[in-house]
Image: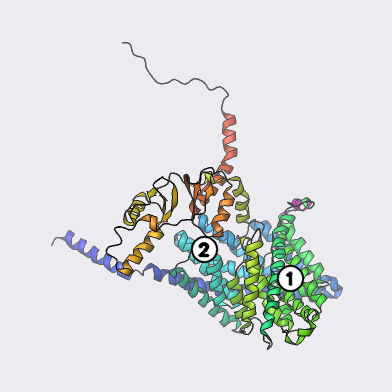
Amino acid sequence: MSSLSRLSAGESRLTRLFNQLQPPPETVVLVLAVLIGGSAGLSVLLFRYLIETIHHLALENLMGIIGHWGGWTLACVPTLGGLLVGMMRWFVQEFSPNLMSLMSAVEAGQEIPLIRPIAKTLAAAISLGTGASLGPEGPSVEVGANIGILLGQGLKVSRERQKSLLGAGAAAGLAAGFNAPIAGVFFALEVVLGTTFETTAVSVVLLAAVISALITQIGLGSQPAFELPAYEVRSSLELPLYLGLGLLAYGVAIVYTQLLQWLPQIFQGKIPPMQFLGRIPLPLRPLMGGLCVGLVALYLPQVLGIGYETVEAILRDVNFSLGLLLVLLVTKMLLTAVSVGSGLVGGIFAPALFLGASLGAAYGKVLPILLPMFANSIAAPAAYATVGMAAVLAASVNAPLTAILLLFEMTRDYRIILPLMAAVGLSVWLVNSFSVQKPGELPALAPSIESHKEEQEENLPNLSVAEAMQSPVLFLSEATPVVEAGLQLIEKKVYCAFVTDSQQDLMGLITLGDISRVLTRWEADQETTAYPTQTVGSVCTRNLLLAYSDEPLKDAIDRMAARDLRQLPVVDRNNPQRVLGLLTRENIRLAYSLDQTRRKLLPYLERTMLSLPLEPEPVASGLVETSP
């Protein structure tokens, strides 16, 4: 054997050995899950330590120095926090986007600079440590999500894999923030990944949440967030009363989420007659928010900061008067919206729990007055406070499973689970049935002034379906065999095709998923005779939702979101049987990106047109006339 042959054989053996030593992709992903869970757990512990340290410095050391000047000095603490956050906004210019915007950034392939999540986490610690009326869980979720994104960016993984890592990070952040790993998993699957997750993604999310919660329990202990007294549902006839609480929770959640949407617009000067606020520099707005929180805290210190002490007091059935509970409900709601709108940094989970506890306790106090004959059969106000927490939270972020499991893990009490599920189910059903804009469509965890998603939603109505639809499309006769249809989809490299009848009218739609399900059924039934004769007309999807080429793109998007569809046929409005094209999620993202680029190019194109002469000089054609 020649030396060249021996060298080639050696290289082949070395390549095979290298391939054997390389871990499969699933192993790499699980290792990433461990890294994300561990990093998120340690980061949340550090974040909590920063909050406690700043809280100690501000409300103990600083107040010990200036407190002898009078009680009014308490207002200086949140104001100072707002000043520091404003200075950070001036230096950093733009913080890391919230969770919903992070998801949009992943889908658009945008990279997140490392400085932004670090700056936002520090700003959140300052805001919460000095008394902003917000919560630590939203920033905890964003810490985990950013870790997942940064790992995905560093390893150059695909967008789908990066979205899975983002979901794992969000689950780890929530698991560490609330010490609730099950709720963290369901939050990632319900809110972040939606219906797009696969089994591998679930494994990643589970492992990251477990590791993160384990680290948090080592650092902070395994006790539940709230210690509840012993109580129980006294009568099955009480269930309608909890449904009434779910109805009230729906109303509170709608007002709460609308305020979270309006206050940032007010501080930006977009709502009359408050346009003058838009002229205030962005770094000074957090100072205004901190001053508002501080002034109100002089009279209602319960609304200062995260508020878990007040929530636990309500759950322990401390004797709060009905008037005080209602005042705390309204004031906490307004101050949370002011904190968010002014640019202070924090989450909306903890305030939602505060609102739910206040609402439920007030409701529990009113019931014996309204129904004195059933007073002995009505549970204590603390029971209604627990249910109210879950109902308001679920309706605010449109995540019922997360809210139910979160309250169960935070209280570790099963006795109230059935009323809890009833109230949560009603409140979320009302949100999805009667609200024009669902709370879940808002930046659910930490709304911010620089929301990329809101900007995208503002621009979509300017686009029509015709500008985003895909054309031409593939048509198949209803008599086409399933096997041949699959081959045509593969040959044309398309996801779906339209099925027409003998008059060329639209019958339905067939996708790669439909064909895969048919093939799987054949394999399971060991069919040997049916597959040559089965046609696409018998397996295609009928009763299609349609889009029209001249309608606004946003209307078609709402129709797709209502049933979680991947595509919509685009037809002629005057002849719905005539197909003009296909609208897919990928087409919508592309249309938005093209529109944004076109807007940015417009000034350069205008300058180019202005620089051209009005009457261009004649240009020689380059043709030479020859003599015959």
Question: Element type at marker 2?
Answer: helix
Visible residue check, residue 112: no
Viewer-proximal residue among 501 and 359:
501
Quadrant where the C terminus sits is top left
**In the displayed structure image, the side of residue 459 where residue 261 appears, left or right:** right
Visible residue check, residue 240: yes
Q: Residue at x 59, y 66 (%)?
A: 142
Is 263 colored magenta in this rendering?
no
Residue 581 on image: x %, y %: 47, 46
The answer to which quarter of the image holds residue 481 is bottom left
Residue 284 on image: x %, y %: 74, 57
Region in magenta: 276-281
- Tell me the distance, in whole angstroms, between the alpha carbons under discs 1 and 2: 30 Å
Query: Relative to residue 88, is residue 273 depicted above or below?
Result: above
The residue type indicated by label 2 comes to Ile
Residue situated furthest right in the rendering: 70
Q: Residue at x 63, y 75 (%)?
A: 422
Is 277 colored magenta in this rendering?
yes
The residue identified by callout 1 is 131
The residue type indicated by label 1 comes to Gly
Nearer the N terminus, badge 1 or badge 2?
1
Asked which colour scheme the image uses, the reply is rainbow
Residue situated furthest top in the rendering: 628
Residue 240 on image: x %, y %: 69, 77
The answer to which quarter of the image holds residue 327 is bottom right
Viewer-proximal residue among 612 and 362:
362
The residue identified by callout 2 is 149
Viewer-proximal residue among 423 and 112:
423
